[in-house]
Image (spheres, helix red, strand yellow):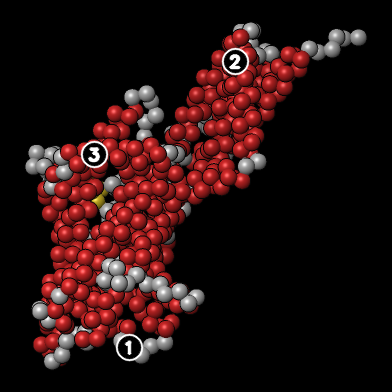
Amino acid sequence: PPPEPTPSSRVRGDLMDALVLLGVQVTGLGLAEDVRDRTPDMSFRASPFLRLRMVGDAVLARDGAQESLADLLRVVEDCRGVVRTVTQHLEDFGVSVDLVYRLECIQRGLDRMEAIARVLGSPRGEPRWREALALLSDLLRLAHADRSVRALVRRNARLLARKIIERTGNTGEHDITSTQAGFHQMVHSAAGGGLLIAFATALRFFLMGLPLAPFFAGLFVAFNYAGGFVLMQLLGFTLATKQPSMTASTLAAAVGEDTGPDSGPRRMERLAELVPRVTRSQLAAILGNLGCVLPVAVAFALGFQALRGHTFLSQEQARDVVATLHPWKSATLLYAVLTGVLLWMSSVAAGWFENFVVYRRLPEALAHHPVLRALVGVKGARKVADALEHHAAGVGGSITLGVLLAVAPGVGSFFGIPLDVRHVTFSFGALALAGSALGSSAVMEPGFLAAVAGVLGVGIINFGVSFTLALGVALRARDVPVSQGLRFLGAVFLRFLRNPLPFLIPPRDEPAMGGTQAQVVPLAGPPGH
């Protein structure tokens, strides 16, 4: 009878079977239609995934000869190049959780095939045992992860984070200034936002004074908030509190890029260039928002009093506004934390909606829709498509933020929880209206000055909470450990302590990105722009 196979031959046969099986699975995933659609420059016959299947058969036919294994490793590297191309396409034109998951399956399969090929191709003795032990440890680790609830939650959280955050930093409404002219342009844009916020604050007091049922009162307040934010987006104005969530994903990208041995200095160099521009842009937006809310709200209150003969807010309403903004005699700082969470949630909605629009190619569908072309013409349909692509994130996030700010107090009262929102710009506008009603002497009283300090605390908490949440999700989406991200940001903070001026004022000799003329540099424009 034929001799019994030795343990090494049985293991070698199992490894060959696994190699062929992985080749079949990876080939099927790599030749899927949505993968091929994202590599339009590559023909089907030239796909390395097709060659992977044929090379796998050659490895099996030649019983793992060195030449066939070397061919396999070259094809595996070519397949990784396709995965990188598709991943870049997703980051530019919308993310799909399903496709990202299948790309990770392809990457895992290629890694496993490479590990098996190293075992089969290593010389006998210690080199082969070393490769075999590396493969075995990887198998044990992933087998444990497959049975771990924590690992399951972590993987799914990463997929969801990837879907909602990749597009968050790619909105056309949020800019990073690089020159003094861009800084001033941001101030002017934010001043327009402050103008609208001042009137939205006054309209909110008017709506809350109407004898409406709670549902309709909340509905009209939501329309007021959302309408103001949408109008701000369409007019090209800026709301400072929406920027931290958007810039956090850009900072995470700067931290997460490059994994080589000298990646640390490169990442620090990118952060050293990016963070000062981010902080200057944020400062410009804050100055524009608050600097315009105060005079517009006071002018509105004085004009109303001159026309109607009485103040816009009653004395009782004004004192109530001052009391609710007191930093330690009210829960205003806790409400500011809740508002920071709502600001972050609106940025999530903005990124998700833009990703949906871009990934589903809705602008392209609108541009070629026969009914729309018949109504407004070819150029008109193209303009509608471009408007949807440009304003998708801004409008989606604006509507979400307006609804959340209006709904949160009602939801709290429904469950018997005293919830409220404290948005720094609206709070400052309300305090300006209250000061106009109380008179110039009242604004120097300790209670009013404490309310001013409360507004300052609200602003810090709004920005801090929304930025921290957005940065955490962005780091998770880009597989950057939180400790690493905090370490880089800590280094940037030390640099700020040594030389804070570049973080606040753009240097005169700093060139604009992409040219010598003053301009505002977007984080990343929509595809095709």
Toward the viewer: 238 or 452?
A: 452
Left or right relative to 301: residue 489? right
Sort mark 3 into few (<14), some (14-19) or many (20+) by Cα contacts within 10 Å. Answer: few
Kindly check if marks 3 and 1 are in contact, taking CB atoms under 8 A apart as contact: no
Residue 37, horizontal then vertical, whole percent: 49, 41
Identify the residue position indicated by label 1 in the image. 210
Percent position (x, y) of residue 292?
Answer: 15, 67
Residue at the image position 39 percent from the left and 79 percent from the top: 218
Q: Residues within 10 Å of mark 2 (few under 14, many from 20)?
A: some
The kind of residue on which mark 3 rests is Leu
**How far apart are the two marked residues, 2 and 1, measured between alpha carbons?**
78 Å
Q: Residue at left 12%, top 74%?
A: 444
Extreme residue toward the right, this view:
1
Callout 1 amino acid: Leu
Q: Is residue 162 left or right of residue 292?
A: right
Determine whether the residue tagged by mark 2 lies in a helix, strand or loop: helix
Mark closest to the chain's N terminus, 3 or 1: 1
